[in-house]
């Protein structure tokens, strides 16, 4: 089993739709979790951290399920500008360790 | 505040040539990282530096060397480029906690 897995998609949705992505991780000792957004031919940009209690930022909601070892990202009222690849990342939070990224899920929002 | 900067943005090398990719950050972060990104492979860690003066291998270190020149700068060197090193290279930096990483704009390298 790969350390961090995502459904590659693509997810093709109309404007205004709600879409959800899941990301599973294999190491139960993982401590911190993030969602990144990557536009075509650009660098990944931090979208949001994922907290144990779940967190929301506008139309975006992130949740963590430690028991089942997955994190999710919910996008409500999708916009054309949400079209991108969404990467999840996890880390052990130990000094000297790095983030482990999933391969990303591609979202395409159409009018 | 420029964040993470990388030079060059694009580079074409012939097999066997060498080059150094430069990365600098102005966020006073302790940790810095080099990744490569290939279609279908996702981001793969080449080397990282948890703090000034230390470097460690990541998932795919073969064919690369790194230097943590000071707290701001972390360079990646290809001693003898191979076509398999054709990729997009990203540098990133983070504080130790909570390990959120911030990426530079990338270097697109083609080895012919």
Image (cartoon, rainbow, N blue to C red):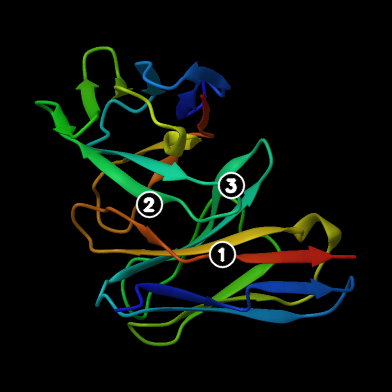
A18 sits left or right of A108 in the view: left
The residue lying furthest to the left in this view is A53
- The numbered mark at residue B35 is none
Q: Which residue is mark 3?
A: A40
Q: Which residue is mark 1?
A: B106
Both marks 1 and 2 on one chain: no
Q: Quadrant of the N terminus of chain B?
A: bottom left
Residue B77 picture location, percent across and down: 64, 77
- Other-residue count near label 2 (Cα within 10 Å), few / some / many at <14 / 14–19 / ≥20: many
Q: CA distance from mark 1 to mark 3?
A: 12 Å
| Nearer to us in this view, B62 or A102 | A102
State yes or no: discs 2 and 3 in contact (Cβ < 8 Å). no
State yes or no: discs 1 and 3 in contact (Cβ < 8 Å). no
Q: Which residue is mark 2?
A: A98
- Secondary element under disc 2, as helix, strand or loop, is loop
Q: Residue at x 61, y 50 (%)?
A: B37
Q: Residue at x 34, y 16 (%)?
A: A18
The residue lying furthest to the front in this view is A111
Where residue A16 sits, quadrant-wise, is: top left
| Nearer to us in this view, A29 or A25 | A25
Where residue B112 sits, quadrant-wise, is: bottom right
Instruction: Classify B13 as above or below A8.
Output: below
Residue A20 picture location, percent across and down: 36, 18
Instruction: Classify A22 as above or below A39.
Output: above
Chain containing the residue with disc 3: A
């Amino acid at each position: 089993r790969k350390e961090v897995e995502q459904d590659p998609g693509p997810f093709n949705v109309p404007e205004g739709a709600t879409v959800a992505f899941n990301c599973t991780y294999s190491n139960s000792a993982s401590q911190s979790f993030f969602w990144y957004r990557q536009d075509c031919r650009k660098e990944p940009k931090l979208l949001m951290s994922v907290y144990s209690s779940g967190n929301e930022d506008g139309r975006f909601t992130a949740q963590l399920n430690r028991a089942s070892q997955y994190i999710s990202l919910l996008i409500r009222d999708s916009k054309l500008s949400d079209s991108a690849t969404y990467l999840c990342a996890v880390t052990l939070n130990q000094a000297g360790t790095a983030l482990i990224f999933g391969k990303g899920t591609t979202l395409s929002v159409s009018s | 505040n420029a964040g993470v900067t990388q030079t060059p943005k694009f580079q074409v090398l012939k097999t066997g040539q060498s080059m150094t990719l430069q990365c600098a950050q102005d966020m006073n972060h302790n940790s810095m990282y080099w990744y490569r990104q290939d279609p279908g492979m996702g981001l793969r860690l080449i080397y990282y530096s948890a703090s000034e003066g230390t470097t460690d291998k990541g998932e795919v270190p073969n064919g690369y060397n790194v230097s943590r020149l000071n707290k701001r700068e972390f360079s990646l060197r290809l001693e003898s480029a191979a076509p398999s090193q054709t990729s997009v290279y990203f540098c990133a930096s983070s504080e130790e906690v909570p390990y959120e990483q911030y990426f530079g704009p990338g270097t697109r390298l083609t080895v012919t």
